[in-house]
Amino acid sequence: KCFGDRDTGAFGDGAEILPIGTMLASYHIKGSVTMSGAPLSGVTITGTGIPNGATDSLGAFDIANVLEQTNYTITPSLAHYHFEPTSASGTLTGPATHNFTAALDEFSVGGTIVVNGEPLSGVTLNCTGSGSATTDANGQFVLSNVSYGTSCTLTPTKEYYSFEPASQVIAVS
């Protein structure tokens, strides 16, 4: 049995009854994921209310056969990346397109420089390709916004000082 208003097609809980023989169209939800303007492959597109998908070698995804009137949310994910926007959602009334921009996750790298157990301020630490930092009164330094996957040579310098080791390779992974 079905309880509701036969004339309006509404159930008591607000659900809609479609007339017998009503067919819903199916559409595609498409889009792309890029990083610095280049396509990014291997990104998983997780769907709420729809099947999951993934980007191909051109950074494109295509989720097919999604029924009209489907409420959906899609969220891109790939280890060590973040995305803008973080997700996209809607109610499907026709083909939909959503594009995302990716960036590598960023971290801070820090440490302390000491001489004979005492902190040394004013030491400049250069990290090839990732910038530089200077130690504070406590001998501490922080390199900010170092991208995941970065490998650089960290070299300390200060007039009248030499350091052992003279440089050190660091990798953010």
Image: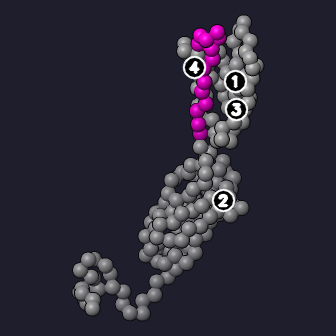
User: Dot 4 corresponds to which residue?
Assistant: 140
Range drawn in magenta: 106-120
Marks 3/2: CA–CA distance: 27 Å
Task: Specify the color scheme.
Answer: one colour
Q: Which amino acid does label 3 sit on?
A: Ile
Residue bearing mark 1: 126
Element type where label 2 sits in the image = loop
Residue 52 % position (x, y) = 56, 68
Q: In which quarter of the image is the N terminus?
A: bottom left
| Local secondary structure at mark 1 | strand
Q: Residue at (60%, 49%) from the top-left corner?
A: 81
Marks 3 and 2, the one that precedes in the sequence: 2
Residue on which the image places disc 2 = 42
Q: Which of disc 2 and disc 1 is earlier in sequence?
A: 2
| Mark 2 Cα-neighbour bin, 10 Å: few <14, some 14–19, many ≥20 | some
Q: In 3D space, how far apart are the residues under numbered discs 1 and 4 (Cα atoms)?
A: 14 Å
Q: Give the spatial CA distance, label 3 vs label 4.
A: 17 Å
What is the three-letter code of the residue carrying label 4? Gln
Check if mark 3's residue and mark 4's residue have beta carbons within 8 Å: no
Task: Tell which tag, 2 or 4, sits nearer the viewer.
Answer: 4
Q: Does the magenta stretch include residue 113?
A: yes
87 and 173: which one is in front? 173
- Side of 104 where 87 appears, left or right: left
Against 20, is 159 above or below?
A: above
Identify residue type, mark 1: Asn
- Within 10 Å of disc 3 (Cα), the crowding (few <14, some 14-19, many 20+) is few
For label 3, the residue is 170
Task: Give the residue displayed 65% in from the left and 41% down from the top.
Answer: 173
Magenta span: helix, strand or loop, mainly? strand
Q: Earlier in the sequence, mark 1 or mark 3?
A: 1
